């Protein structure tokens, strides 16, 4: 399916890492031995997951394409998990997916011989720390809560019974016809009543309270002060004027992506997700540390979540007067472990020195293009061509591989009847892209596909055309490196401030490959003045597009274009080869380990296996898997990995 959505929330890990590692270790090592043939370098990377994870090789990037999540994602994940349990069938399904060459990823810049290793054997082998716009790396290292006289007492969080909380939540969310909830005050005192008033207002924004006498007993009456508009809107009068309106905190999360995490937090806080802000979305299959801001929720209330949420920790609280904005970051710092590596010490040294001194090709990674037989760039191309029947067909038609169950039945029904109502009935989760488009077709009719498509959230719609731009860029960069190698040449583009200029013959010695940029196609960019400029035009002509007319009749789909460096040289590159015997043992300590006082892992000097621990920092809009690809000389596509390793270990 095109997107995955969220409903109920599981607070437990789907599988314990320790549960899987021991039983499957012998099998895993056998697979490793079978998996050492790969792409044109003769090498490969293996990927082993606790469960068949379609986002398996997804890595954290700071490319900001936030997608609007609905509240039904986890249900779908739970349904799919049973179907995906057969590792052979999942591998067979992924035979229809994309490889790197399908999306223009074909070149390397380094000359070393590649070697194999296991990427993300455990999600804890991939750790990401956000780098803020001030250059500060986010760390979780402080659980303390800033206290002021306005904070409610700790009793606020325990004075209400579970039944009271359930009734209040239903009232707050307008889930029943009740206009108020009455809570009897047991052991009535003024202090007790005050705590209940504070608890209701603090835990259920949008509700007001009053005290009433009924039959000689005191009751706290909770009610909506301003109807539906008050829902989840923090009350202005309840927030101290001296305190910043936004509570900033560091979110440490394991095996959840950023939007899933915010949906979980908003559910437990009983607020809407849109009061949270952040600088970048982070990967699911990793441990990630990033800054979040939330409007008028106290640090005390946030810290209370640490007691009831698994795989999340919140800390480093502070109050500020501003939210966070997407893109306002310098990048991410990665700590990555590649297990069971086969490279010699010389190979590893050559690979890592090359990464530090030369860098890697700044390709858009595989997750940019989807995992199914219908790549997202094909849908983007049809949008730009104004071919709306093709857009509809590509999203809804049956596709081989990568899907099972209700989604397949929905597609089959669509192919047979072209009846949006009948197809929608077959779909168990209605708020995926397919469901949204079918609802749009029901509302607007088959002759108004543009309006029907417009029901899909804007960011998801734009994802398709951005994917097409990325597809063109990857292909053109491969051609550029094939034609001219790793040196600046006359006709290349470089940036002077924010403006692109051509490199002239007389100035070419003043530039290196690290200065060269190439355009994503659009109406507001210029193109190289050599063969690659013509190659852009030829590629778009072959796709029935005019490079000189990238404006679309629908403004949202007009592409202005942008510039992107073709080579990225990571900063703060460090590495170490370590030996280990037990794959369950972590090979470094996380922020949470340090806070909990866990000692560094004790590793053998001469273990059965070797791992490469590497650290590096990347700027926004770059993909860590592309850096790892350069080190290992591997194909990072899920299709390639499942062909190499057809036994998926839970």
Image (cartoon, grey):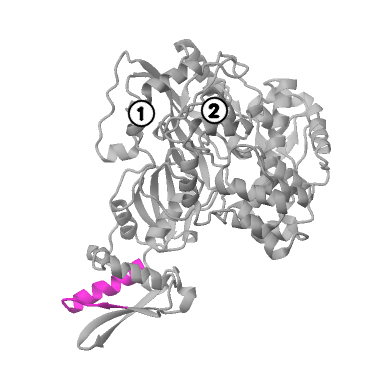
Give the residues in magenta.
Answer: 182-204
Vertical side of 284 occupied by 462: above or below: below
Q: Which mark is residue 642?
A: 2
- Is residue 366 visible in the rendered image? The answer is yes
Q: Nearer the viewer, residue 403 or 236?
A: 403
Task: Give coordinates of residue 573: x percent, y percent.
Answer: 47, 26
Give the class, few, some or many, for how many residues have Cα within 10 Å of label 2's Cα (few <14, many ≥20): many
Kindly state the secondary structure of the residue where label 1 is placed.
Answer: helix
How far across and down, in percent of the image, does residue 261 sit?
Answer: 43, 50
Specify whether residue 104 is in view.
no
Where is mark 1, residue-wise?
A: 21
Dividing the picture into quarters, in which one does residue 99 lie?
Answer: top right
Magenta-drawn stretch, dominant element (helix, strand or loop)? helix
Q: Is residue 192 magenta?
A: yes
Disc ID at residue 413: none
Marks 1,2: beta carbons within 8 A: no
Give neighbour class at mark 1: few <14, some 14-19, many 20+ (Cα, 10 Å): many
> Disc 1 to disc 2, how far (Cα)?
19 Å
> Which quadrant, please, contains the C terminus?
top left
Instruction: List the single residue furthest toward the left.
Output: 187
Whichever of labels 1 and 2 marks the residue nearer the N terminus, that label is 1
Instruction: Determine whether the residue tagged by mark 2 lies in a helix, strand or loop.
Output: helix
Q: Nearer the viewer, residue 355 or 212?
A: 212
Residue at image point 30% right, 59% down: 300
Residue 404 x, y percent position in the rendering: 56, 42
The answer to whether residue 494 is left or right of residue 181 is right
Q: Nearer the viewer, residue 438 or 195?
A: 438
Magenta includes 341?
Answer: no
User: Which sits in the foreground, 401 or 471?
Assistant: 401
Residue 243 point in image, percent of width and height = 37, 64
């Amino acid at each position: 399916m095109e997107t995955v959505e969220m409903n109920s929330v599981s607070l437990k890990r789907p599988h314990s890492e320790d549960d899987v590692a021991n039983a499957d270790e012998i099998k895993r090592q056998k697979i490793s031995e079978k998996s050492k043939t790969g792409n044109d370098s003769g090498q490969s990377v293996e990927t082993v997951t606790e469960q068949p994870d379609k986002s398996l090789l997804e890595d954290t990037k700071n490319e900001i394409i936030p997608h609007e999540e609905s509240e039904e994602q986890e249900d779908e994940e739970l349904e799919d998990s049973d179907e995906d349990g057969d590792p052979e069938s999942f591998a067979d399904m992924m035979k229809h997916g994309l490889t790197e060459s399908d999306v223009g990823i074909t070149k390397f810049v380094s000359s070393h011989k590649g070697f194999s290793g296991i990427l993300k054997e455990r999600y804890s082998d991939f750790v990401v720390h956000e780098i803020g716009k001030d250059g500060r790396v986010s760390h979780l290292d402080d659980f303390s809560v800033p206290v002021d006289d306005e904070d409610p007492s700790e009793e606020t969080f325990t004075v209400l019974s579970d039944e009271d909380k359930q009734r209040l939540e239903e009232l707050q969310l307008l889930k029943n016809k009740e206009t108020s909830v009455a809570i009897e005050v047991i052991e009535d005192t003024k202090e007790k009543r005050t705590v209940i008033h504070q608890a209701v207002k603090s835990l259920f924004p949008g509700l007001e309270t009053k005290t009433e006498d009924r039959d000689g007993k005191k009751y706290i009456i909770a009610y909506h002060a301003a109807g539906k508009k008050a829902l989840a809107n923090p009350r202005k009068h309840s927030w101290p004027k001296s305190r910043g309106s936004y509570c900033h905190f560091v979110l440490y999360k394991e095996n959840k992506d950023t939007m899933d995490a915010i949906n979980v937090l908003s559910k437990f806080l009983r607020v809407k997700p849109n009061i949270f802000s952040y600088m970048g979305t982070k990967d699911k299959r990793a441990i990630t540390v990033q800054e979040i801001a939330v409007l008028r929720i106290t640090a005390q209330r946030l810290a209370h979540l640490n007691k009831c949420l698994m795989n999340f920790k919140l800390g480093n609280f502070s109050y500020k007067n501003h939210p966070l904005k997407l893109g306002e970051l310098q990048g991410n710092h990665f700590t990555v472990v590649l297990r069971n590596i086969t490279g010699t010490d010389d190979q590893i040294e050559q690979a890592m020195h090359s990464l530090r001194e030369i860098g890697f090709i700044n390709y858009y990674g595989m997750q940019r293009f989807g995992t199914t037989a219908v790549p997202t760039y094909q849908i983007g191309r049809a949008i730009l061509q104004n071919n709306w029947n093709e857009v509809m067909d590509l999203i809804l038609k049956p596709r081989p591989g990568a899907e099972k169950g209700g989604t397949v039945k929905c597609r089959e029904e669509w192919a047979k009847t072209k009846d949006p109502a009948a197809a929608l009935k077959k779909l168990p989760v209605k708020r995926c892209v397919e469901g949204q488009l079918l609802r749009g077709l029901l509302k607007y009719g088959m002759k108004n596909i543009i309006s029907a498509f417009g029901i899909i959230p804007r960011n998801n719609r734009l994802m398709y055309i951005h994917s097409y731009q990325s597809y063109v860029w990857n292909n053109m960069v491969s051609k550029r490196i094939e034609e001219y190698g790793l040196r600046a040449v006359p006709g290349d583009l470089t940036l002077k401030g924010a403006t692109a200029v051509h490199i002239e013959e007389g100035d070419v010695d003043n530039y290196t490959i690290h200065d060269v940029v190439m355009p994503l196609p659009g109406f507001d960019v210029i193109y190289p003045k050599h063969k690659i400029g013509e190659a852009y035009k030829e590629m778009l002509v072959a796709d029935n597009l005019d490079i000189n007319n990238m404006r679309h009749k629908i403004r949202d789909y007009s592409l202005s274009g942008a510039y992107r460096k073709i080579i990225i040289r990571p900063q703060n590159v460090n590495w170490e080869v370590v030996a280990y015997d037990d794959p369950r043992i972590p090979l470094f300590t996380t922020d949470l380990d340090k806070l909990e006082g866990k000692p560094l892992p004790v590793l053998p000097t001469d273990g059965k296996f070797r791992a490469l621990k590497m650290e590096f920092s990347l700027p926004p809009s770059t993909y860590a898997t592309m850096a790892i690809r350069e080190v290992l000389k591997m194909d990072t596509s899920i299709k390639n990995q499942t062909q190499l390793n057809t036994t998926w270990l839970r």
